[in-house]
Structures are given as C-alpha cells and as structure tokens.
C-alpha cells in the first residue's frame, strides 16, 4: 500500500513548521543537515532542532538561522539548487517550488522572473525549507502528499504571493478571523508542488507536530503518515522482443525509459525464432505514461511493435534512515510490510564514497541498521 502524508493545517503552514512536523514524525535531523551540506550552505546557515510543549501539545520547533549570506535573486537560487548534491527527485521538486514562487511573485510585482529579487524569500532559509522538506518526505518513504483546507484571513494577512501560488492547485481556502499570516509563501510553495488538497483514507502509522514562530499553542501544523486504503495499484506492462539491436545499446535504452517516467525496466535474454539470441525488454509504466513510453520504446529501439497489458502491483513500503559505522555515516533503505521493517539495504554510493572495502562498509551499515530497528 502507498505511504501517504497528510498535512492538517487548521493554523496554516510555513516551511519551518513543515520541517518540524516531519522531524517530529520520525525523520532524521541528519537528513536536514545533509540538505544544508548538499546546498553548500554550511557556513551560511545554522539549524536548531528542539522539542517544545505548548499547552497540552508537544512537538518540534526548527529554527533556520542565516548568517551574513547574500539575498539571492531567483536565478541565483535556481543555480544553487541545480549545482547541489541533492537526490534527483528532491532537486526536481525544489526547482519546481522555486519556479512556482517566481511566477507568483512576478505576477504580484510585474517583474520578469529572471530579474526578480525575492527580498526575504531570497535568503538561504528558503532553500533549506524547500529542499529540506522534500528530502525529509523522501526519507520517510512518502509517495503521496495531501493537505487539509487552509485558513485565509482577510486583508493583508493572506499575502498576494501566497494566493497566486495556490491558484489552480485545488487548494480550499476557509475564512479565518485571526490577524496573522497563517500560510507563508514557502509553506504554500511546498503544498502547491507536491500536495493534493483532499483527505485520504489511511491506516495511521505515525504523527508529528511542528511549531511556528508565534508562541501561541495553536501555531502548529500536524502531519499524519500512513498507508492508503482501498487503492488499486494498476500499472501497464509494455514488452518488446528484439533480436537485431546491438546489446551495448540496451543499457542506455533502459536509462532513457526510466528518465521518461518508467517505474521499472528489465532486459531478459531470450531465444527467438530460428534459434536466434535476443532480448525481451519489459517496461512497467504508470497508466498515464504508458502511451508515451510505448512510443519511446518504438522510437529508440529496432522493434516493430510492442505488447501492452494491464497488471496489478503490490509494493512493500520503504523509508530511509542514516546509521553510523566506524567508516562514517551511511543511508540505509528500510523495507517494510504492514508498517513493520523486514529488511535493510545500504545505499551503495554512500558506501563507495567512504572508500576502502565497499563490501565491508555495506555489511557494517546493514548490521547497524538491523540493531537500530530491532531486527538483529
């Protein structure tokens, strides 16, 4: 079943509130620190993560403090993200959020995006809020994000940029009498990029609460994380048998199909007519991408036709955690069934980056993860 995150926003949402909620729900602070490092902002940004209790609610407050770094233009923010060592989906989502921010502010101020100065949104904390939030979602294995209706105070308390960001997203705005900015542009950009504004049915696994800068107990956002119920995991399977294509061209073919949205690509040796050796290319595609991927397979291979069938798919859950070994820190993928960890797999690139015996690093990381998860 798909793991989903639902942001419950009766008091709005900001970037730091979203970070706090995800950390309170079990994401690792080390992932947030890794985002700062990947963005090249270590000397410019200091992060404090602390537990707080407000009224009868305990949660997490994240403070992203910026030093004397520059206020960047939109193109400069984009350049930082493009050059950062972020996971690919995190980078893509961060760039999309920046693009949405730029379009919204451009319409508000009447300035082309390439000349846009974002003022307080041009600080390093904007990058940390966006990339950090998307990376924390990734580390928790969240595949879908949903959000509640958003409070919208009248007058200047709901900024024009925030409203522009939410245009066309399906966001539901509810009248609110409070006299404060409840949904910040950064919080709106996060939801506009990844969220559907509907409440899913789910089996609840964990919750988290993130506090904002205002000290009142209501200034919090909740995130509910669980498994979606009642979904049909339907995929399209596209196949082609090929016996007249150079084998060294099959690897880039698989890479191209993955880059165009395939869920998986497999290449299997087969024996074809007249005993000729060949290959079976199997592409697993989301239904909405099946036609484009079938056409891509026809264009980029020598096959004259493809077979397309509909199939059901059952997925194990996954999330990431970081473990400490004597060689250094390693991210480990955790496989889960019915919300419980059943297996671990260290990330190969992390282990290789530490140098030495890669196999030994992988074994040590797996052992550390199993101990932490109670699987040892």
Image (cartoon, helix red, strand yellow):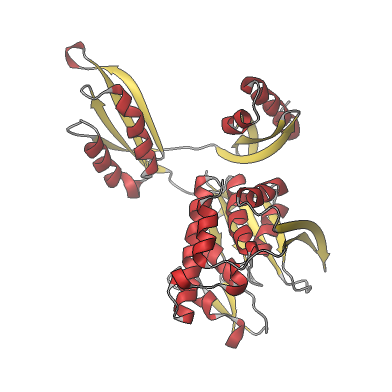
Which is more toward the observer, 25 or 73?
A: 73
Q: Give the total number of marks visible in the rendering.
A: 0
Q: Residue at x 69, y 49 (%)?
A: 33
Relative image position of residue 18 (x, y in whole percent) = 65, 61
Residue 149 higher or lower than 178, as above or below: above
Q: Residue at x 61, y 56 (%)?
A: 133
Residue 288, placed above or below residue 252: below
Q: Position of residue 313 (x, y in %)?
A: 43, 38
Whether residue 146 sits left or right of residue 41 in the image: it is left
Q: Nearer the viewer, residue 144 or 65?
A: 65
Asked whether residue 243 appears in the rendered view, the answer is yes
Quadrant of the rendered image containing residue 293? top left
Q: Quick check: 203 left or right of 99?
A: right
Question: In terms of depth relative to the viewer, which is nearer, 202 or 305?
Answer: 305
Q: Is residue 197 visible?
A: no
Farthest bottom residue in view: 155
What is the x, y in percent for residue 367?
71, 26
Residue 170 locus on image (x, y percent): 46, 69
Q: Residue at the spot x=78%, y=74% of the render?
A: 216
| Image quadrant in which the C terminus is located | top right
């Amino acid at each position: 079943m798909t793991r989903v995150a639902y942001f419950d926003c009766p008091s709005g949402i900001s970037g730091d509130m979203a970070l706090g909620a995800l950390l309170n729900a079990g994401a690792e602070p080390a992932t947030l620190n890794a985002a700062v490092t990947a963005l090249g902002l270590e000397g410019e940004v200091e992060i404090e993560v602390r537990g707080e209790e407000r009224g009868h609610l305990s949660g997490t407050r994240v403070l992203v403090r910026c030093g004397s770094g520059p206020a960047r233009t939109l193109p400069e923010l984009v350049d930082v993200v493009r050059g950062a060592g972020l996971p690919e989906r995190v980078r893509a989502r961060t760039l999309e959020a920046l693009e949405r921010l730029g379009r919204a502010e451009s319409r508000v101020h009447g300035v082309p995006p390439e000349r846009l100065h974002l003022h307080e949104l041009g600080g390093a904390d904007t990058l940390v809020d966006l990339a950090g939030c998307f990376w924390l979602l990734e580390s928790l294995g969240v595949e879908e994000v949903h959000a509640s209706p958003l409070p919208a105070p009248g007058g200047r308390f709901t900024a024009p940029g925030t409203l522009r960001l939410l245009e066309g997203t399906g966001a539901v705005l509810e009248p609110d009498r409070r006299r404060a900015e409840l949904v910040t542009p950064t919080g709106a950009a996060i939801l506009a990029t990844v969220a559907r504004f509907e409440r899913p049915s789910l089996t609840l696994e964990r919750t988290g609460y993130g506090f904002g800068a205002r000290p009142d107990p209501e200034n919090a956002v909740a995130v509910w994380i669980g498994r979606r119920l009642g979904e049909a995991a339907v995929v399209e399977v596209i196949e082609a048998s090929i016996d007249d294509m150079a084998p060294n061209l099959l690897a880039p073919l698989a890479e191209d199909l993955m880059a165009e949205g395939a869920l998986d690509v497999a290449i299997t040796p087969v024996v074809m007519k007249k005993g000729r050796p060949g290959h079976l290319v199997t592409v697993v595609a989301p239904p909405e991408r099946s036609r484009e991927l079938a056409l891509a397979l026809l264009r980029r291979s020598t096959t004259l036709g493809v077979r397309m069938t509909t199939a059901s798919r059952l997925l194990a859950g996954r999330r990431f955690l970081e473990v400490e070994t004597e060689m250094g820190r390693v991210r480990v993928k955790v496989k889960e069934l019915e919300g419980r960890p059943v297996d671990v797999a260290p990330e190969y690139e992390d282990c290789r980056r530490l140098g030495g015996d890669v196999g030994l690093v992988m074994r040590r990381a797996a052992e550390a993860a199993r101990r932490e998860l109670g699987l040892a």
